[in-house]
Amino acid sequence: MTALQHYLLLAVALFCIGAWGVLARRNIILVIMCIELMLNAVNIALVAFSNYTFGGSGKGQVFVFFVFAVAAAEVAIGLAITIAQYRLRERTSVDEMKEMKG
Amino acid sequence: MTDFHPVAFYLIATTVIGCAIGVVVFKNLIHSAISMVCCFIGVAGIYILLKAELVAVAQVLIYVGAISILILFAIMLTRHRSGDISIFFHRQSWVAIPIVALVFIVLAGVLASARYNASPESMNLPTREMASLMFNQYAFPFELVSLVLLVAMVGAVLLASKEKKP
């Protein structure tokens, strides 16, 4: 294996663990945490490709910053929805969130 | 493979994978959150190994600093039930493991067999050139992403604020 493949294998493993958490767990905050793990895996793949191919042009790293911003926005919205839902129903389980209307 | 440090890589990769598994399997949400913070720190170490210092610093600032605090506050603001395993995992959660294992095998097989036009050494742009790339060639997406962030913050405040019933 080359060095690039090591990093990509790590990214794939992290992505799959995050997907496992999203599929298997019930708590919505934990689902959000696992989505963050998956975004981190994508970032590792982006940086690895950016630094090992095309002479290290660095464009992948610029995209990592965009992913950071979108991840921050996603966490803020997700947790706001969680807290609004909790005020309404006192529940944080994804099974019990059948309706989102207030 | 002159600049690839196998010992450091395997040490950090084991930490990252172990902490990620901890996030999924811990029953206490606070333990999961702490495990997630350790995983993020490990990912920052991976960026250092890849010679992407700017991304590593941003990772520590944004993920370890901001996002984990946000998640910890959300855990503290909500009450969580305790009980046996059925409260934490779906009844059908065993189906997730073979599906994810299949995805992993397919992806790992593809990346092991694919041919990359990769250089053996990791190369990285200096921070100054990264900044000029970001603010010249990608200036418009940068502004757009700041707008997305602003809209998301206003929306989050609106959603989470207590509304007064008339």
Image (spheres, coloured by chain):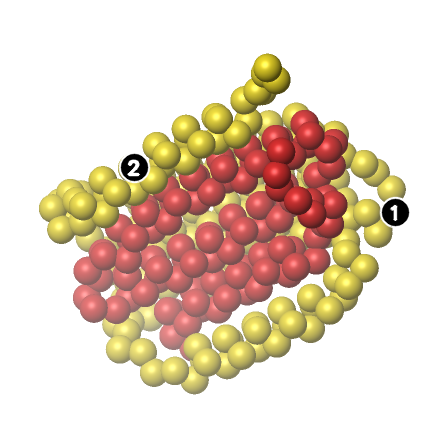
Left-right relation of B125 to B47: left
Checking the image for residue B51, the label placed there is: none
Tags 1 and 2 on a common chain: yes
Camera-side residue of B3 and A97:
A97
Q: Nearer the viewer, residue A97 or A64?
A: A97
Q: Quadrant of the N terminus of chain A?
A: bottom left
Q: Alpha carbon of mark 1 to alpha carbon of mark 2: how far?
A: 44 Å
Q: Which chain is yellow?
A: B
Letter of the chain that mark 1 sits on in the rendering: B
Q: Residues within 10 Å of mark 1 (few under 14, many from 20)?
A: few
User: What colour is chain A?
Assistant: red
Q: Residue at x 18, y 49 (%)?
A: B138
x, y (%) of residue B160? 55, 27
**Which residue is farthest right?**
B84
Residue A24 point in image, percent of width and height: 70, 58
Element marked by disc 2:
helix
Q: Is residue A76 above or below residue A94?
A: above
Tell me which residue sits at (48%, 26%) in the image: B158
Residue at which label 1 appears: B84
Left or right of A27, for residue B82: right
Residue at 57%, 77% in the rendered image? B105
For the residue pair A89 and B53, the one nearer the viewer reads as A89
Q: Secondary structure at mark 1?
A: loop
**What is the quadrant of the C terminus of chain A in the image?**
top right
Q: Residue at x 62, y 69 (%)?
A: B100
Q: Earlier in the sequence, mark 1 or mark 2?
A: 1
Q: Which residue is mark 2?
A: B147
- Looking at the image, is A68 positioned above or below residue B117? above
Query: The disc labelled 2 sits on which kind of residue?
Result: Leu
Please indicate, yes or no, whether residue A71 appears anywhere in the rendered image: yes
Q: Chain of mark 2?
A: B
Q: Amino acid at mark 1?
A: Asp
